[in-house]
Image (cartoon, grey):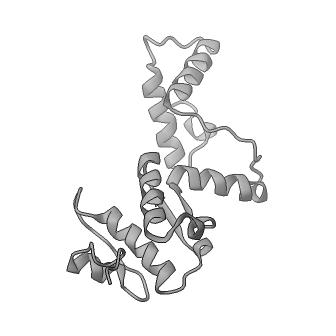
Amino acid sequence: MADPILDPLNPEQRRAVTHATGPLLILAGAGSGKTRVLTHRIAFLLRDLGAEPRAILAVTFTNKAAREMRERLERLVGAERLADLTVGTFHAFCARLLRREGPAVGLDRSFAIYDGPDQRALLRRAMERNGLSERLFAPGAVGAVISAAKNELKGPADLTGS
């Protein structure tokens, strides 16, 4: 009888998918089947190892990849098995986590996440209010300085005079 989880895999992929315990690192180039391995691994964990869907977190970089992963999983194990499985982007998962747990560290649940255009518009308004010319200070460069400071855990007081 055909096995939809294991049969489509090459030997290396099958070895990764059926890895029983402990961590496993998958390193491979673009288009080599990493998403297939992860998707089939999740299906194997659910079907063969009895993993609980709520105990699995599958994160990707793009919404498209997350959508494709969920669709592949639905074909492999059925949508009903995935009700408690978290599949999404790193950003969506972290936003959900911060909304749920943020109040424990003083973060309001109703915080906003600005995308690139929103960030630039906010910078332009702040620069205009503070009399800073876009000719002298490009909003993108100002944003890069702020981003670098945040990465180094520096606040406004640390940047005074910079």
23 vs 144: above or below:
below
Residue under the point 72% across and 59% down: 101
Which residue does the image show at 28% across and 83% down from the upper left?
15
Q: Give the percent coordinates (x, y) of residue 17.
A: 35, 79
Horizontal side, residue 55 vs residue 109: left or right: left
In which quadrant of the rendered view does residue 43 lie?
bottom left
| Picture coordinates of residue 134, whole percent (x, y) | 47, 13
Q: Residue 10 vs residue 34: left or right? A: left
Residue 110 percent across, percent down from the top left: 75, 42
- For this rendering, which residue is in front, 78 or 127? 78
Report the front residue among 157 and 105: 105
Residue 121 found in image quarter = top right
Question: In this orientation, which residue lies closer to the viewer: 157 or 3?
Answer: 3
Q: Is residue 47 above or below residue 105?
A: below
Q: Reply above or below: 147 against 60.
A: above
Quadrant of the frame with the N terminus: bottom left
| Rendered residue at 31%/65% (across/down) | 34
The residue under the point 62% across, 50% down is 95
**Could you say where residue 133 lies in the image, as x and y percent from the top left?**
50, 11
Q: How many marks?
A: 0
